[in-house]
Image (cartoon, rainbow, N blue to C red):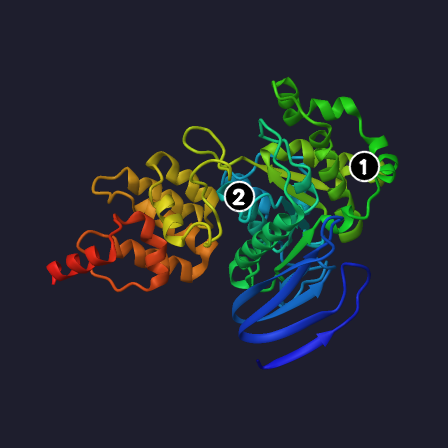
Amino acid sequence: MAGVTAAAGGTGAAMSRAFHYRFSHFYFPFRSSLSSPRTSSIAASSSLLFHGNTTLSFSSFGRNHFFVSSAVSDRTNGESHRRPNVVDILEERGLLESLTSDNLRNACSDPNLPPLKVYCGFDPTAQSLHLGNLLGIIVLSWFQKCGHRAVALIGGATARVGDPSGKSLERPELDPETLVNNTLGITDTITRILGSRSRAQKFSGDYSDSLVILNNYDWWKEVLLLDFLKQVGRFARVGTMMAKESVKKRLESEQGMSYTEFTYQLLQGYDFLYLFKNEGINVQIGGSDQWGNITAGTELIRKILQAEGEGTYGLTFPLLLKGDGTKFGKSEDGAIWLSAAMLSPYKFYQYFFSVSDSDVVRFLKVLTFLDMEEIKDLEKDMKKPGYIPNTAQRKLAEEVTRFVHGEDGLAEALKATEALRPGAEAKLDWKTIEGIAEDVPSCSLAYDQALRAVSRVA
């Protein structure tokens, strides 16, 4: 390590002790704990692994969230360079569903305005995020690439309630220890994908990319029910809450909806208000099923802070759907997990390599960062005589696997794919063998039977 410097200063929760490291390869362990009435101290360790010659800043924002950034030069508010318009980019690629205000287009590229702070929420209801969550990460990454600040909000509190959006049944209750483990797993995944400077940069090396990870349990654990009803509940209109699409569907169903679930939109709405007021975060993004929860936040900001909607924005993107029109999720069999511990890079790669021709172009647009011209060329090639089948799928699989699992994960997937090719000769390590074990025909033999089988082959 060439050098270590420490800097302290700043104001409020957004600035605290920061340590800057200059390195080529550095392994940074951290600990996170989450207290609850049932568990006074549950702690687990995790780690961040970064590659490349860069400078990173780590800042503490409390026990359960931290700040990761690579040090590159910041531009001033009067910068002459106009940032690429991320809203236009998202729209062109089919990643824009709705905006709370079209003024976001101007706010995201006006050189006289500071970069936006944009957040997306992820409830830790499983140990890993899945393919349905990947669009949120990709949209955050597009904001990063265009010079804005990305914030991932882990729903340590909201996961205890359960989002009714798109669900026909109430989510099962999770115990605090499971929530902690899930939070650590999801934090590692998001940091691995979005925390690298090399993946965030696109249009200009001068932008300061950064990733902030927060946990909403940090502020919700201090909120008392009577205070919440007085400060927030009185601004919520029951008629408006019942008109939300996610609520209407559940109320009309045989199972109905509990009061706990009914309050979810208020909790998420208050998160936006809290983040806007205390962290300066002014944009919330989410899937199209989150529109009601996002607008609940912009309404609370308008009513409670007396702030007109010009300073805060909501943006939704279409849900990533399967060929049969259903959502990708974690409760269905065969979920496409983003964690290598739950789904090997090989299997992840093979999923995208097997995408149908009717879906591959759409997936290239929304799940990769390839230039649109290159995607259009691939689409044209698919219609030409002599097109080699699965060429577009191979490109899709390589790009998405690289984004989620990095170069090492892609190399592992390609090595395993080559090894399983009929007639191929390949030397595999145990990690690769474990990744493909379930996809290779096999049988179990007693020890003496195995010896006899080996001797016959010999």
The kind of residue on which mark 1 rests is Arg
Please tell me in which quadrant of the rendered image residue 63 appears: bottom right
Across and down, in percent, residue 212 comes to 66, 56
Across and down, in percent, residue 355 comes to 36, 40
Please tell me in which quadrant of the rendered image residue 315 appears: top right
x 41%, y 46%: residue: 373
The kind of residue on which mark 2 rests is Leu
Count of numbered tags: 2
Of badges 2 and 1, nearer the viewer stands 2
How busy is the neighbourhood of tag 2: few (under 14 within 10 Å), some, or many (20 plus)? many
Task: Tell me the quarter of the image containing the N terminus.
Answer: bottom right
Task: Tell me the quarter of the image containing the C terminus.
Answer: bottom left
Q: Considering only vertical position in the picture, is 26 above or below 83?
A: below
Across and down, in percent, residue 17 comes to 75, 69
What is the spatial separation of the Cα atoms under label 2 and label 1, in whole angstroms? 28 Å
Q: Considering only vertical position in the picture, is 207 above or below 399?
A: below
Across and down, in percent, residue 325 comes to 46, 28
160 horizontally vs 431: left or right: right
How busy is the neighbourhood of tag 1: few (under 14 within 10 Å), some, or many (20 plus)? some
The answer to the question of whether label 2 and label 1 lie on touching residues, with beta carbons closer than 8 A, is: no
x 73%, y 48%: residue: 38
Q: Nearer the viewer, residue 250 or 376?
A: 250
Q: Which residue is mark 1?
A: 302
In the image as oriented, which residue stretches furthest toward the front?
A: 448
**Callout 1: SS:** helix
Q: Nearer the viewer, residue 157 or 72?
A: 157
N-terminal of the pair, mark 2 or mark 1, is: 2
Q: Considering only vertical position in the picture, is 363 above or below 68?
A: above
**Callout 2: SS:** helix
Residue 112: give its label.
none
Residue 135: give its label.
2
